[in-house]
């Protein structure tokens, strides 16, 4: 069972591989560092269901977003974040959060909410989402191997 440092290294190499494969396209630009951070956070994301580094980061970020949403009177966002914050405490380790569909669908809420509120930054947010998912898939790959990406329980 790899520790968070191993997952961060896996996320870094995932970013590097994608960067090298797509560097001839213009998807990176000024956002390369942001995409690296997204990939690294994604590489920790499946462990949000344990007392881990990513759970601490997640709850801090969700707390800040909730405060900002309440101050801006964006009650839908605050309610959504509140429900989202319950997921880690309601699931068993390596069950729900280590499923491919989970690491694709749950983070997709960020680009969807961004599109609803600010269409101008949707491209970098969506590319960041793709890097996040790539990092999360690297986590599952490190935990279970290539066949673990497709296993069912």
Image (tube, rainbow, N blue to C red):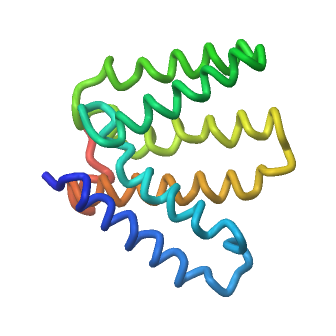
Point out the residue furthest to the left here. 1
Q: What residue is rendered at 69% in x and 21% in y?
A: 69
Residue 25 quadrant: bottom right
Q: Is residue 46 left or right of residue 134?
A: left
In this view, 16 is above or below 63: below
Residue 37, horizontal then vertical, whole percent: 50, 58
Q: Is residue 142 left or right of residue 81?
A: left
Point out the residue furthest to the right here. 120
Q: What residue is rendered at 43% in x and 29% in y?
A: 59
In this view, 22 is above or below 61: below
Q: What residue is rendered at 57% in x and 22% in y?
A: 81
Residue 146, horizontal then vertical, whole percent: 27, 62
In the picture, the quarter occupied by the C terminus is: top left
Residue 93, horizontal then vertical, whole percent: 22, 32
How many discs mark residues in the rendered view? Answer: 0
Q: What residue is rendered at 30% in x and 31% in y?
A: 49
Residue 77 quadrant: top right
Q: Is residue 25 left or right of residue 19?
A: right
Nearer to us in this view, 123 or 105 = 123
Point out the residue furthest to the bottom here. 24
């Amino acid at each position: 069972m790899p520790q968070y440092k191993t997952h961060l290294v896996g996320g870094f190499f995932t970013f590097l591989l994608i960067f090298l494969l797509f560097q001839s396209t213009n998807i990176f630009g000024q956002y390369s560092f942001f995409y690296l951070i997204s990939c690294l956070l994604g590489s920790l994301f499946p462990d949000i269901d344990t007392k881990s580094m990513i759970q601490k980061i997640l709850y801090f970020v969700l707390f800040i977003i909730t405060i900002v949403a309440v101050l801006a009177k964006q009650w839908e966002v605050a309610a959504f974040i509140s429900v989202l914050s319950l997921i880690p405490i309601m699931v068993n380790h390596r069950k729900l959060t280590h499923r491919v569909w989970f690491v694709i669908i749950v983070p997709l809420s960020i680009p969807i909410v961004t599109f609803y509120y600010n269409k101008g930054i949707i491209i970098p947010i969506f590319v960041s989402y793709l890097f996040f998912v790539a990092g999360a898939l690297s986590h599952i790959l490190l935990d279970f191997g290539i066949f673990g990406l497709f296993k069912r329980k």
